[in-house]
Structures are given as structure tokens and as C-alpha cells.
Amino acid sequence: MKKLIVFLGFTALLLLNSCNEPGIDSQKSTIVDVFAIPPTDSSLLFAPGIVSQGLYERDIAISPDYNELFFGILTGKVTTIMQMKKENNEWTAPQVAPFANDPQFFFLEPALSPDGKRLYFLSTKPRIGEDTLQGWANQNIWYVDKLDDGIWSEMKDLPDHINTDGGEFFPSLSNNGNLYFTWNAKDSRKSYVKKAEWIDGKFMEAVFLPENVCGEGEIYNACISPDESYLIGCATGRDESSQRAAQYYVFFNLGEGKWSDAISLGETVNLPGTAAISPSITRDGKYLFFASDYIPDKSAEDKILNASKIYSTYNHPQNGLMDIYWIKTDFIEKLYPSVENPNPTN
């Protein structure tokens, strides 16, 4: 977890959602297909009124068969992971994931294994030997396994060579099981991306990605493409002409441990006036999901305030808090730089 945008000023208004939310009927346990209308070449708000409701939503993990998904939600008091499943050809309404229902800790940044049977995520729950600390002081990567009956197991933490005394967060996995995640040293705000190879059923020692990925400015919350051909990360200090706090960038895998310099994903993903916080890619590599606090331009008449407009605005997405968007990944390969090795290997 990095660069959490403060939104306490909105909290009181958002609590009104329970009585006015248009997207989910509290009397119904099932909803429409969230993937029914896919995006094309433009970014599309994902499942408005269902997933993107007007709260602070970010981070999404989707099963390989598109029948289960997890996403993060933040309020003034709660930071947790929500779960939805497709059952009997209908989607259940969002529920708190069973392993993330302890309100004294934070849960965020879900990422599924290649087979969809293990879910990794960030939690501030203390590991054995750690003290319970306030806020984001404890950040480690945990996981749960899907049991034979479809229920998720009790949560377990990754070993010490992954979870150090620093902070570990935003896990992402390639098709071969390699783990990419963000790390910062204890008492340091500078973050880096690490990679831990999956060999013989366990993660190896994590290593830093090279200087052109981790060195300039700062990078955090980065996800790997399923085939490991590129990495998308939230980064600052890569474009002196930009006044943004952070943008979404792609780094292409050039093979032999080398990566390209940062290439902006442009305003197709870096929507006007927004900050980058959370990318993810579906297991088939077809869609990029990302979080954005984009607010569409208002017409002249909308600039006249009254109480009704204020309350209705904050009961819907695109109100200045983070929403989840998706777009086809086809445009990313067009950004691939001219290099000597056009066919990167892992």
C-alpha cells in the first residue's frame, strides 16, 4: 500500500450510500453480469453501482474463468477486501471476504495465483513475534488457499525471506508463479519492486528489478503481465513535464534481466487530472484494470450547487474518490520500444 489518498472530508457524505445507492438492491442477493459490456479501445468504468459505487474502490483480482473476483474498498474506518462469485449463472452481491473480516486490521491488494486456487494480499495483521501496530505500520503479504469445498482457508503469511522487517505489499504473479511485489525498508518512504522466482513449489530469495525500473523517482504498486513480457507500475519522477503525483507506466521485459525505461500509458489510462494507484491484468492478458479518481467535466448548469446535487454526487462513482476502470490491453504492445531484442525472454 502506497500513496493512500486522504478522503476524510467525504466520509460523512458517503455514509449515506446505505439508503440511496442505486446500483444494488439490498433485497436481492444476485446482480447482473459485471463483464457483460466489455471495453474496447477506451477506458470504461467497471460495474458502476456494483463494484464502483462511489466509495473508495481499488485493486481487483479476477479468477481465470471470470467466475470470481475480489476488490479493495476503503472507508473512514475500514480497509478490506470484497468478494463476488458467479453462482447458477448469476453474480452474488459484494460481500466482505471471509478472511478479511477483522476490522482491527487492514486487508487490501488481492492477487490470484495462475490457477486461481491461491489468493495473495496485503494485511497489517501482525505476524508471529510482531506487535500490533496502528495504521499501516505492519505491511506484509499473506495468502489463503481454496479448499476442495470452495471455501477459502485461514490466512497464512509468506516466509521471512519475503516478509522482512520492512514493508511488503501489492503482490502480483506471472503465469509461471513468479511473485512481483513492492518493498520499502523499515522507517523509509522509498519503495522498490522485487521479484521472487517460484521454483519447486516455493519462492526463492527476492531480488530488486534494475535501476531504470526502481531508481529514478519512485515506483510502487506494480503488476506483472501473465507472460512476464511487461510490468505496469505507478511511478513518480519519470516525466518532468507532468505535474501529476503519479502516473501509470509500462516497463517492457528486454530479456536477461533487463527492462526498458518507463513509457507512459498516456491519457487513455492516465485520465485527466488523476493519480495512479492500482493496476492489474487478467490472467488471459486481455484486460488491464486500474483505479482512477477521475471526475468528468461538468456542464455549466452543474456548477450551481444545491444540497440535492451534493448528496446525489457522492452516492455515485466519479465523485473524486477512486473507482475501478478496465480497458483492452491491445494498445500496450504498440508502445513497445525499438530494441535489439524484439522477443524478450524471462
Image (tube, grey):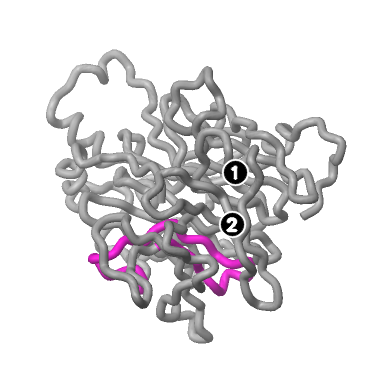
Q: Where on the picture, by quarter, is residue 186?
A: bottom left
Image marks 1 and 2: residues in contact by CB distance under 8 Å: no
Label 2: which secondary element: strand
**Going 73% across and 38% down the picture, which residue do you hit?**
333
Question: Dot 1: few (<14), some (14–19), or many (≥20) neighbours within 10 Å?
Answer: many
Closer-to-camera residue (31/311) = 311
Q: Is residue 112 magenta?
A: yes
State the separation of the CA atoms marked 1 and 2: 11 Å
Q: Is residue 94 visible?
A: no
Magenta range: 98-122
Closer-to-camera residue (114/87) = 114
Q: Position of residue 118 (x, y in %)?
A: 54, 72
**Going 20% across and 17% down the picture, which residue do you hit?**
304
Whether residue 115 is situated above or below residue 181 in the rendered picture:
below
Closer-to-camera residue (71/204) = 204
Q: Is residue 16 left or right of residue 235?
A: left
Whether residue 61 is situated above or below residue 299 in the rendered picture:
below
Instruction: Name the residue tied to disc 2.
Output: 180
Callout 1 amino acid: Ile
Q: Is residue 29 left or right of residue 19?
A: right
Among numbered discs 1 and 2, the one appearing first in the sequence: 2
Instruction: Name the residue tied to disc 1.
Output: 232
Callout 2 amino acid: Tyr
